[in-house]
Amino acid sequence: MFKLKQTGSQSTASSFSASIIGAGNTITGDINSTADIRIDGTVKGNVFSKAKILIGADGIVEGNIYCREADINGQVCGNIHTEELLHLKGSAAVSGDINTGKLFIEPTVNFNGQCHMGANIVELKPEMAIVVNE
């Protein structure tokens, strides 16, 4: 996958990196990434990304999620920490607390937990997420 960047009159291609955990795969342990992650399989551990996390309809995460932005269609058993937008859609099922800048929930989503959003900044740290008030 490539994105074209224009600098002046010259176009250059820069590589775009995304990781995919396919359906039928199970990962046990924490995942750390600086790029986008798509999960269609099962992750038993925490997921850290400085970019976007997308969980497909059949995707399952049994652990906490820390990222800049997330789209969730599958199941999450753990807390979700996003700096910007969290989009819960389709048949998503979340059992855990949410800390996010902005939240969009479709009416078909099942969510059990507490939600904190707005002016708080969520710092992404592999050890834990720390919420700091401005």
Image (cartoon, grey):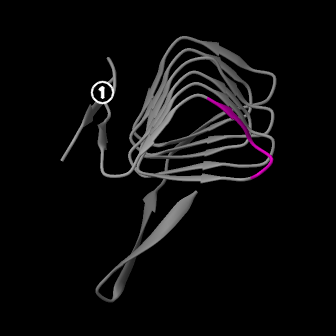
Highlighted range, magenta: 107-112
Q: Nearer the viewer, residue 85 or 41?
A: 85
Residue 52 percent across, percent down from the top left: 50, 46
Q: Is residue 109 magenta?
A: yes
Residue 40 percent across, percent down from the top left: 73, 33
Q: Amino acid at mark 1?
A: Lys
| Horizontal side of residue 120 vs 104, given as left or right | left
Quarter of the rendering occupied by the N terminus: bottom right
Q: Residue at x 18, y 47 (%)?
A: 134
Question: Quarter of the image holding residue 60?
Answer: top right
Number of marks drawn: 1
Q: Nearer the viewer, residue 110 or 61?
A: 110
Badge 1 density bin: few <14, some 14–19, many ≥20, Cα 10 Å: few
Residue 22 percent across, percent down from the top left: 74, 31
Q: Residue at x 49, y 16 (%)?
A: 30
Vertical order, 37 against 84 (above or below) = above
| Horizontal side of residue 44 vs 59, given as left or right | left
Q: Residue at x 30, y 51 (%)?
A: 119
What residue would you read off at disc 1? 125
Residue 79 percent across, percent down from the top left: 51, 25
* Furthest residue toward bottom: 9
Which SS class for mark 1?
loop
Q: Nearer the viewer, residue 5 or 56?
A: 56
* Furthest residue toward left: 134
Q: Is residue 26 magenta?
A: no
| Horizontal side of residue 88 vs 115, given as left or right | right
Vertical order, 94 against 108 (above or below) = above
